[in-house]
Image (cartoon, helix red, strand yellow):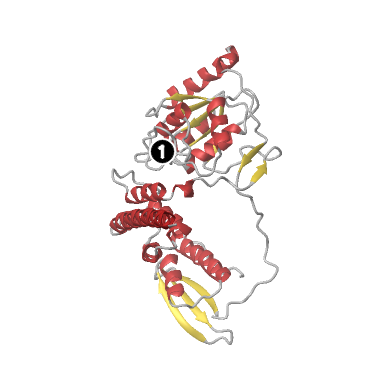
C-alpha cells in the first residue's frame, strides 16, 4: 500500500513538473512575441504596414492568447496605434510581425491545423471562382497557360493588353500564403491550365515565386507549411492538402522569375501552348475532382429591413473647398447643435467622433465612414458633394 502511494506521488509530481515546464515555455514564447511586436510598433513604417496589421488582428482573435491578459491588452492597444495601410509589405530583412507569428505557431501549432469548414459547389459559377487582381481569358482548351507576375502588377496589365495566344489568366502574387492560395484554387477549377509561368520580380521577404517552386517540388508538411520555402510565413490556412496535391499534379511550373520583357514572356506563353498540342501525354495521367473546392460561405448582401437611429444623434457633413477642410456638425434629434468637428481627411474626423463616443451604432459608424470618404474625394477631385441617405 505504501509503495502504491509513493508511485501515485511520483506520477503526480511528474505531471505537475511537465505542466509547469509547458506553462513556462509558453510564457517565455509569449514574452518574446510581445517583445518583437513592441519593437515593430515603435517604428513608423510598421504602423503603416499590412504585415503588422494582419498579425495583430490574427492574435487579437486568437483564443490562445486570451489567457495572457497583458499580451492581449497590448495587442488591442497596438491595433489602435496602426495608421492607414500604405503598403502590404516592404520586404524588410528583419520582419518583426513575421518573427512573432512564427514563434506563435511553433508554440500553438494547433492554430494552423484548422481546415476550411465549408465546401461550396463552383460547378455553375463563372470561372475563376476566387476573386483577386487578375485578368482572365479562358476560351476552352486553347489557353493552357496561367501567368503570375509576382510583385509586378503593371506587368500583369501589359501582358493582359497584349492577350497572347494560349494565355488563360494573368495577375500578381505578392504573398507566400493568401496570394498563393487564390492561385491554387483558381487553377484546380480549370482543367485547361497546364502551366504556371512565373515572371516579374519576386516579392522581397515573401518570395512568392520561390515558394511556388518549393510547393510544386516538395508539397506541404503536416502543419500545411510549404517545405523548403524561403518565405517568412509560408503556411497555407485556407486550402486543403487534397487541393495542394491536385495543384501539384495538374501543372508544371516554368521559372522565368526576374524577367519583365513582355516580348520574351509572350514568346514563352505561345511556345508552351504549342507544347500541349504536340504532346499532351508528357504531363502524365491525372484525374482530379474539381467540382468542389474549400471556401468560406459567400453571404449575399441585403438591404436592411429596418434602420435603427443612433441615440447619440446625427451628422451633417459639409466639405469646404475654399478652406480645403471638411466640417461635420453633430446634432441631437431635437435639432440641437452638439458639436462641430473640422478636419482635412475622413480618417482624422471619424476617429475623433469615435474617440469621444459621439457614435454608438455600428451601422452609423459604417455610414459615417462612407460619407466622409466621399466628402474627402470631393475636395480632391472637385465634384459637388451631396450627403446620401442613411
Q: Where 276 sits versus 237, above or below?
A: above
The residue drawn where x is 43% and y is 65% is: 347
Q: Which residue does the image show at 34% across and 58% down from the upper left?
A: 27
Instruction: Give residue 30's position: percent from left, percent from top.
Output: 35, 56
Return the residue found at the far front: 1
As rendered, which of 376 and 202 lies closer to the eye?
Answer: 202
Dot 1 crowding, Cα within 10 Å, few <14, some 14–19, many 20+: many
Quadrant in the picture for residue 20: bottom left
Identify which residue, 368 or 51, lies in the foreground.
51
- Quadrant assignment for the N terminus: bottom left
Image position of 126 with respect to 247: above or below: below
Q: Residue at x 40, y 52 (%)?
A: 50
Total number of numbered discs in the rendering: 1
Q: In the picture provided, is 13 more to the left or to the right than 365?
A: left
Q: Which residue is mark 1?
A: 151
Residue farthest top in this picture? 278
Question: Residue 299's x, y, as percent?
Answer: 65, 54
Q: Position of residue 285 (x, y in %)?
A: 61, 19
Q: Can residue 232 be seen?
A: yes
Which image quadrant for residue 351?
Answer: bottom left
Q: Is residue 87 visible?
A: no
Q: Is residue 167 left or right of residue 37?
A: right
Q: Helix, strand, or loop for circle 1?
A: loop
User: In the rendered view of the protein, which quadrant contains the C terminus?
Assistant: bottom right
Could you tell me residue 373's position as x and y percent? 49, 63
Amino acid at each position: 500500500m505504501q509503495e502504491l502511494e509513493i508511485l501515485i506521488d511520483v506520477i503526480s509530481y511528474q505531471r505537475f513538473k511537465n505542466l509547469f515546464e509547458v506553462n513556462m515555455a509558453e510564457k517565455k514564447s509569449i514574452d518574446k512575441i510581445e517583445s518583437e511586436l513592441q519593437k515593430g510598433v515603435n517604428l513608423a513604417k510598421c504602423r503603416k504596414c499590412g504585415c503588422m496589421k494582419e498579425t495583430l488582428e490574427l492574435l487579437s482573435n486568437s483564443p490562445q492568447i486570451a489567457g495572457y491578459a497583458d499580451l492581449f491588452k497590448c495587442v488591442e492597444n497596438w491595433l489602435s496605434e496602426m495608421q492607414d495601410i500604405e503598403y502590404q509589405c516592404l520586404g524588410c530583412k528583419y520582419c518583426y510581425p513575421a518573427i512573432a507569428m512564427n514563434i506563435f505557431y511553433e508554440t500553438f501549432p494547433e492554430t494552423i491545423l484548422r481546415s476550411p469548414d465549408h465546401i461550396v459547389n463552383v460547378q455553375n459559377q463563372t470561372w475563376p471562382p476566387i476573386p483577386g487582381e487578375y485578368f482572365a481569358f479562358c476560351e476552352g482548351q486553347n489557353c493552357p497557360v496561367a501567368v503570375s507576375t509576382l510583385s509586378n502588377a503593371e506587368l500583369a496589365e501589359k501582358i493582359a493588353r497584349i492577350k497572347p495566344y494560349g494565355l488563360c489568366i494573368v495577375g500578381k502574387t505578392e504573398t507566400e500564403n493568401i496570394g498563393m492560395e487564390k492561385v491554387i484554387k483558381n487553377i484546380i477549377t480549370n482543367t485547361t491550365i497546364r502551366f504556371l509561368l512565373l515572371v516579374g520580380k519576386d516579392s522581397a521577404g515573401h518570395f512568392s515565386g520561390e515558394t511556388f517552386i518549393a510547393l510544386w517540388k516538395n508539397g506541404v508538411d503536416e502543419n500545411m507549411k510549404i517545405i523548403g520555402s524561403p518565405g517568412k510565413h509560408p503556411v497555407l490556412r485556407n486550402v486543403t492538402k487534397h487541393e495542394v496535391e491536385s495543384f501539384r499534379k495538374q501543372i508544371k511550373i516554368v521559372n522565368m522569375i526576374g524577367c519583365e520583357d513582355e516580348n520574351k514572356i509572350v514568346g514563352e506563353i505561345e511556345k508552351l501552348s504549342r507544347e500541349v498540342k504536340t504532346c499532351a501525354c508528357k504531363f502524365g495521367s491525372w484525374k482530379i475532382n474539381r467540382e468542389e473546392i474549400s471556401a468560406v460561405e459567400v453571404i449575399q448582401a441585403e438591404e436592411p429591413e429596418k434602420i435603427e437611429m443612433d441615440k447619440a444623434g446625427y451628422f451633417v457633413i459639409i466639405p469646404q473647398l475654399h478652406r480645403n477642410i471638411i466640417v461635420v456638425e453633430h446634432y441631437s434629434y431635437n435639432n440641437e447643435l452638439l458639436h462641430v468637428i473640422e478636419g482635412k481627411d475622413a480618417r482624422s474626423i471619424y476617429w475623433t467622433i469615435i474617440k469621444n463616443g459621439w457614435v454608438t451604432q455600428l451601422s452609423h459608424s459604417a455610414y459615417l465612414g462612407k460619407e466622409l470618404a466621399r466628402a474627402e474625394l470631393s475636395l480632391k477631385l472637385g465634384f459637388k458633394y451631396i450627403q446620401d441617405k442613411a
